[in-house]
Amino acid sequence: MTPPLEPAVLLPAFAPYLDVAGIAVFAASGALAAARRAQTPVTLAFFALVTGVGGGTVRDLLIGAPVFWVHDARVAAVCLVMAAVIWATPERWWRGAALDWFDAVGLAAYAVYGAAKALGYGVPPVPAALMGVVTGCVGGIIRDVLAGEPSILMRPELYVTAAALAAGLHVALRQLGVPPVVAAGVAASAGFALRAAAIRWKLALPAYGERD
C-alpha cells in the first residue's frame, strides 16, 4: 500500500508556517473571547488552546492521521503564548475589526491546509474539501459554544462559505492538475477575498423565510 503523502508534498514548503500562523490567529480569538468576559489567565489559555487546535484535531481523527498538536510541541506553545499576549496587553489594542481581518487570513489558509492534508491521506475530493471546512471552522464553533455566543453556524454572515470556497477550490484545482503552489495560492486568495467582502460590506446568505 502506498503511504499517504504529507501536506508538504501538496503545498508549498512554507505551508507549515502558514499552519502555525493560522493556529495563532484562532488561539488569539479564543483568548479574546475569554478576556472580554473578564476571565482568569487559565481560562484564557484553555480557550486559546481549544480554539487553535479544535478544527485540526477533529480533522486528524476523521482522516486517521496522528493528532497534529500532540506530536508538535510548537502548537500548544503558540496557543499559550497568544493567551499570554492577550492577557498582558491593554483591551483597547484589540477593539475594532483588526482581529476579523487576521481571522480572515487564518480561515482561508487553514481551510486550504486542511483540505490538502486530507488529500495527502487518501481522502476523496469531496470529503477532503469538507475536511478543509472542518479545519477552518470547528475551533471557532467550540469557542462560541464555550463563550455562550451564537455559533458561527447560526449566523448568516459569509464565514463557513468562505472556508468552503477556499477548500473546495483547492481540491478542484489539484484534481485538474494545477501545481500545488498555484492551487494553494489561488484558493486561499479566493477564500480570503470572499471573507473580506463579507466583513467590508456585511454580505450574508439569505435566511430561511426571507424569500417569502
Image: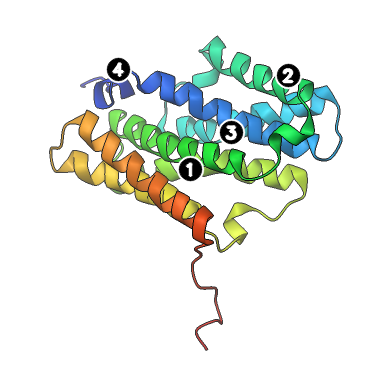
The residues bearing labels 2 and 1 have C-alpha atoms spaced at a distance of 27 Å
Tell which circle, 3 or 1, labels the residue nearer the N-terminal end: 3
> Which amino acid, mark 3?
Phe
Q: Mark 1 points at which residue?
A: 134
Dots 3 and 4: beta carbons under 8 Å?
no
Query: Does the image show residue 184?
Result: yes
Residue 86: x %, y % from top left: 72, 26
Height in image: 157 above or below 83? below
Q: Name the residue under label 2.
A: 84
Q: What residue type is labelled 4?
A: Ala
Give the mark nearest the N terminus, 4 or 2. Answer: 4
Q: Nearer the viewer, mark 2 or mark 1?
A: 2
* Label 3: element kind: helix
User: What residue does disc 4 label?
Assistant: 13
- In the picture of the structure, the residue carrying the numbered disc 3 is 26
Left or right of 162 in this view: 143: right
What amino acid is labelled 2 in the image?
Ala
Sequence-first tag of 2 and 3: 3
C-alpha separation, residue under disc 4 versus residue under disc 1: 23 Å
Where is residue 182 shown, x and y percent of the image? 21, 34
**Alpha-carbon distance for marks 2 and 3?**
14 Å
On screen, residue 143 versus residue 10, left or right, reads: right
Residue at image position (40%, 19%) is 16
